[in-house]
Image: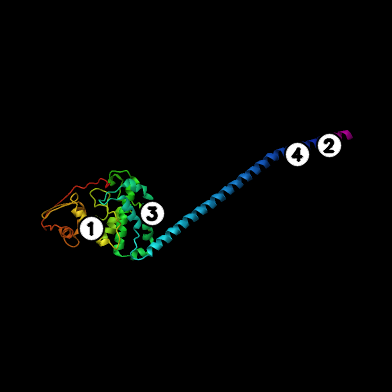
Amino acid sequence: MKNSIVLILIVLFSSCCNAKKVAQDTTKPIQESTVLQEQAVAEIKTDDLVLKENTIQETENIKAKDTIIQKEFNQILTKTEHSNIHFLWNELLQKHVSDNGNVNYKSFKTDHKKLVEYIHILALLKFKPEFDSISKNEKLAYWINAYNALTIDLIIKNYPVKSIKDIKDPWGQKLWELGDKWYSLEDIEHEILRKMDEPRIHFAIVCASYSCPKLQNTAFTASSLETQLTAATTQFLSDTKRNEIKENSLKLSKIFKWFDKDFEQNGSLIDFLNKYTDITISAKAKISYKDYNWDLNN
């Protein structure tokens, strides 16, 4: 009897030991798996933390850069009335536009970053509350330069092209944000400039085409605007490739047909022309219009 009991106890003890060993062997992989999971989670958290810190740093760098740009721009705005915020545009025009108004778009493209910087300056100025209180001449110079700079920007982004009309809806696309509003070239020309009662803007803004008035290679400024607009008008009218003016007959650019009402605000079209030509045109002069060449002005 005793021997039977002892035998039973030995068997039970052996079973317990085997069960414990199996349990230990089963628990070990689970423990190892848990450790690996914890390490993976820790690595992910570390990566997330590093990414978050880098993102925060990049955001701070952007904010710091914008702050610097804003400070520099504020300094520009607070200078004397003779300051020229269009100095960068003037520099680009001098470098890439000939005296005849031909544009070297290939070389201009190498300075596209500077052009974008100038457009950014225009955007900052438009955003400031002070913009609404600047003089009419300052606004005219601003929008004329803006129109021409954005036209160049449009051509460069699509270059090489043979004509601005090869670009889809070139005047209707709202591609530029100035202040808190997006603008197209049409918006600037028809909704802003043409409503400022200055018909000579038609000889200052340029559509990047051969039959357009030439792109002046100096920026328009408020202090010189009257002289600049007069010069642009007389140059365009005296250019026989674009206008042929005689006492009794006129072969004019279609600009005078498309925007005839703009030139008749203070009299007839001929009254307007007589202010800017050496020839005295008869009130009964016969008027016809030249074909418009949309080839690129390069």
Toward which corner of the image does residue 129 lie, by quadrant? bottom left
Residue 262 location (% of width, % of height): 21, 58
**Which residue is at 42% across, 60% downward?**
72
Query: Disc 3 and disc 1: Cα gap in Å?
Result: 28 Å
Instruction: Please give the residue where the numbered disc 4 appears in the rendered image.
Output: 20
For this orientation, the residue located farthest to the right is 2
Q: Name the amino acid type tagged 4.
A: Lys
Q: Is residue 61 magenta?
A: no
**Residue 160 versus residue 114: which sits nearer the camera?**
114
Q: CA distance from mark 2 to mark 4?
A: 16 Å
Label annotation for residue 272: none
* Total number of numbered discs in the rendering: 4
Number of residues whose C-alpha sits closer than 10 Å to that of mark 1, classed few (under 14), some (14–19) or many (20 or more) = some
Q: Quadrant of residue 3?
A: top right
Tell me the crowding category of disc 4: few under 14, some 14 to 19, or many 20 or more residues within 10 angstroms, Cα based.
few
Question: What label does residue 9 carry, if any?
Answer: 2
Label of residue 231 in the image:
1
- Foreground of the two, 225 or 23: 225
Q: Which residue is mark 3?
A: 117
Amino acid type, mark 3? Glu
Q: Secondary structure at mark 3?
A: helix
